[in-house]
Amino acid sequence: MTKPTILVTAASGKTGGAVARELLRQGWRVRALVHSDDQRARDLKSLGAELTVGDLFSASDLRSAFQGVHRAYWCAPFHPEARKAALGFAEAAIAANVESIVNLSQWLASANHPSLLTRDSFATDLLFDSLAPRIAVTKLNPGFFADNYLRLIGFAAQLGILPSLTGNSRNAPPSTEDIARVAAACLMDPVAHAGRTYRPTGPDLLSTADMARIIGSVLNRRVVRMEMPMWLFVKAARMQGSNGVPPFELSGFQYYINDHKAGAFERGAPTNDVWDVTGRPPESFGTIAARYAARPETRRSLQSVARAWFDFMRTPMMPGYDLAGFERSVGAQPPERAVFAMNDAEWLSQHQ
């Protein structure tokens, strides 16, 4: 019997790419919706994915992408009008008569959060939930990914410092691969997971001091946590250019740091969802860090260390982003009565 075709959005991104690769590894037919035919897209094609280049904000592109599709994975774009893309996706899914959707949401999703992306996640959750029972919907709401900490591993490798914005608060960060394995399992057996919400986490609650010690062990050098103010992090992000964190993502990130410090990601963690859904334990932070430690930016030389120190010392003098001004320019400013997760009675009641 031929397996149904599964549409994966954001297929050249981190979670989308991982979901597509996991489904292909399991022998499923994957249609990968990508924004451009770049090397990441071609890598998926070489694994057997069917590529479709399109825009999530184009109704015709979405209709075309859904032709012959039976199931779909939704990952929202980092865009001020993400909920419009979600609406177009839902309309195309209904028209194509798909049987199931896996929705990558957020642990913090709420109607009154300062982050527009998080408010849009909440609105998208309501939209997709309204499709049931016509379409089986499964929601994944992971918190801060391990990638959010490990994107700084090059800095740790060169200088022995792990910048931290989160104080002594803790998280059980999931790997991108574990999130993808949970999503793939739900897409492969939608009836078993219809109407369910899963929160993939790592196996252990860790502070950034704990993470620094683990990163040091995989790099075979001493790494210590260094608290960094948000204004300095924003400058460092801008210095990275196209490899850094773009302004819209930073505009949400600044609020998530407040949630992190208040214990929002520690709440209810860790979970057993990775094990329960996939039948295998979640990856430890050390296992994830070891993969990142193999990246080129962790290779040390006299020149690389000198360059890292030079960049570190000049960061305070470099321009950053006016995030408040950016939010106003794209209509992403917080609502008048914005509420962080740990001060939101409704969010707390739903996230035990």
Image (tube, grey):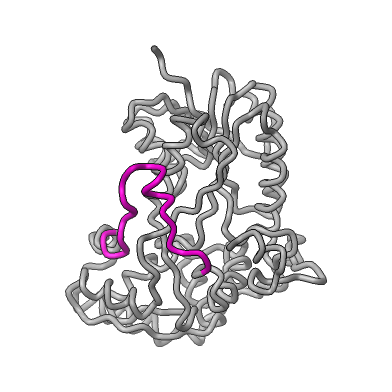
Give the image location of residue 182, x and y in percent: 43, 43
Query: Where 84 sits versus 64, above or below?
Result: below
Q: Is residue 275 above or below residue 290?
A: above
Q: Which residue lies furthest to the right in this view?
A: 336
Residue 299 vs residue 202: left or right?
A: left
Give whichever of 291, 127 is nearer the camera.
127
Q: Quadrant of residue 262?
A: bottom right
Q: Residue furthest top?
A: 1
Q: Where is residue 341 in the image (x, y as percent from the top left)?
A: 65, 69
Q: Does the magenta stretch include residue 139?
A: no
Locate residue 124, reporting x and y percent.
Answer: 68, 46
Is 250 rendered above or below residue 159?
above
- To which quarter of the image does residue 138 belong? top right
Residue drawn at the location 43% of the way across and 49% of the way down: 179
Query: What residue is drawn where x is 59% and y is 73%?
Result: 259
Q: Residue at horizontal 58%, vertical 69%?
A: 256
Q: Nearer the viewer, residue 180 or 196?
A: 196
Quadrant including the N terminus: top left
Quarter of the figure with residue 90: top right
Would you say residue 279 sits in the magenta stretch? yes
Q: Which residue is drawn at 21% across and 73% down?
A: 217
Read off the magenta span. 267-287
- The quarter of the picture where the C terminus appears is bottom right
Q: How many marks?
A: 0
Residue nearer the viewer, 219 or 235: 219
Horizontal side of residue 299 vs 124, given as left or right: left
